[in-house]
Image (cartoon, rainbow, N blue to C red):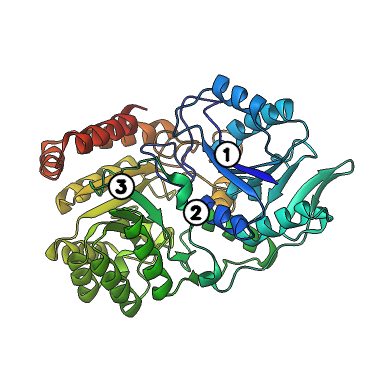
Amino acid sequence: MHLTFVTPPVLVGKRPAERTAGCTHVVYLAPNTYELMVVAMVEQSGQHRVECKDFVYDRGKRSDFERWLQSDDSDIYLMWTVNLSIDNDLEAIALMLKHRPQCHIVLMGPGPTHFTERCLPDERVIVVRGEPEQTVADLIATMSDGGDWTKVQGISWRNHNGVVNNPSRALITDLDTLPLPARHHLEGRKYYNPKLKCEPYTTAVTSRNCPFHCIYCVPSSLTFAREIEHRRVHGCKPPIGMRSVASVDREMEQLCRMGYKAVGFMDDNFIWNEERTLQLCEVMRRHGLVWGCQARVDAITEPIAEALGKSGCRYVDLGVESFDDKILAYIKKGITRDQIYHAVGLLKQYGVPVKLNILIGCSPLETPDTVRQTLREAQRLDVDQVMFNIVSPFPGTEYYQLCRDNGWISTGDYVPSDVQRQSILNLPHLTARQMERALFWNNIRYFLSWRFASRQLRQFTNWHQFSHACRALRIKLFG
């Protein structure tokens, strides 16, 4: 069978959705390591012709997409769909069915996992819910063998009676059994992360999900799909999945052979404990890769900060959201303002650049004054970078239910919105308009400040890096 994994061009709206984190539009392009793991899974059989087509990377247009469909002969198209891409992907499906009426289309990711019925416009479309690797592999194998694919666990599909949701599939318990992402399909593509200022760049994952209970939280797109499906069946968050250090070591060795110089780890939390983190830092030091990760402030100890500094770590994304202890307690963040200061101090002590993630409107306690105070605190910490976003009441989170029950959603119910630009919430003390203005002006004051500009300019080593960073900043500030 001929299988093509497709990222369609922008068909609806003006900007493409970012499909790895899953809740913003693209600021800078990055490979979707989650999709590449599914690609590797179906390639293991050696029975199929597999291709990856990324119209966003190639800057393709609708006309390019339709022209390609008219000449293509794929039996199955597969798409990784997030909430922000649903409308766009449904338009892509309509074009696929128009030009390739005999094909099947498979959707994966958090978008179809939650909005399952909406993502099944035709009987030729199949939704893979939750963790996709084994389900997609079984589905493709069954279809290839001429078996009854409607019996495959973990899928939803439509017949003349409506939508059928097959039983959920159990989570993969040993992540080391999964193949490494099929990065050979990225040959000829170059990605760059402005936070790392080193290329070629790629993404990687060492664990899945997070055990904490922040009421607003949407993890990365794979773990969000995993969490939505697990909550639907079991009523609770899924267990954490971790790869062994040896497995990560093999992947980093492969990346070095392929010529990569920089890695961004997409784990919801990269730092789980000292022993594992120190071992992973040693792996990164030994391979000489420049890298970055996401972590909680309460996970940063002095041994970890020292190891990060010695191993080439160029950024740690810390989700702080607010510097108000009452707000932090309300959103069940499990940290305090003092812990934020302690973690940032340790990282700066060992030369590890820090990025703070701040979420405007993450609690109904938020006011214009608390937002201004958060900006002042972030500036006083003098970190490498601050990222401001606006909370979105994502379905499947406790915050969604809270906002819906209290009538705070201005659109009546959730509609996909870009957390880097717009709000659909009117909170008791903070309106959507106030949040959007606060986001815009916080970004302007921070990213156009002399302090930020001078620090960043010292880190660039060539014009290519500088131009990439300027393009990303322009998109972030002005769309």
Please state which of residues 257 and 411 is positioned toward the viewer in this rendering.
Answer: 257
Name the residue beneath numbered marker 1: 6
Vertical comparison of 139 with 436: above or below: below
Sequence order check, earlier mark of 1 and 3: 1
Q: Dot 3 lies on which element? A: loop
Residue 116 shown left or right of residue 367 in the figure: right
Give residue 11's quadrant in the image: top right
Q: Are marks 2 and 1 in contact (CB under 8 Å)?
A: no
**Residue 187 screen position, x and y as percent:** 42, 44
Q: Amino acid at mark 3?
A: Pro
- As helix, strand or loop, the secondary structure at mark 2 comes to loop
Q: Which mark is residue 182?
A: 2
Q: Earlier in the sequence, mark 2 or mark 1?
A: 1
Q: Where residue 221 sits in the image (x, y, percent)?
A: 51, 51
Classed neighbour count for the residue bearing mark 2: other residues with Cα under 10 Å, few (<14), some (14–19), many (≥20): some
Q: Is residue 20 visible?
A: no
User: Foreground mark, 2 or 1?
Assistant: 2
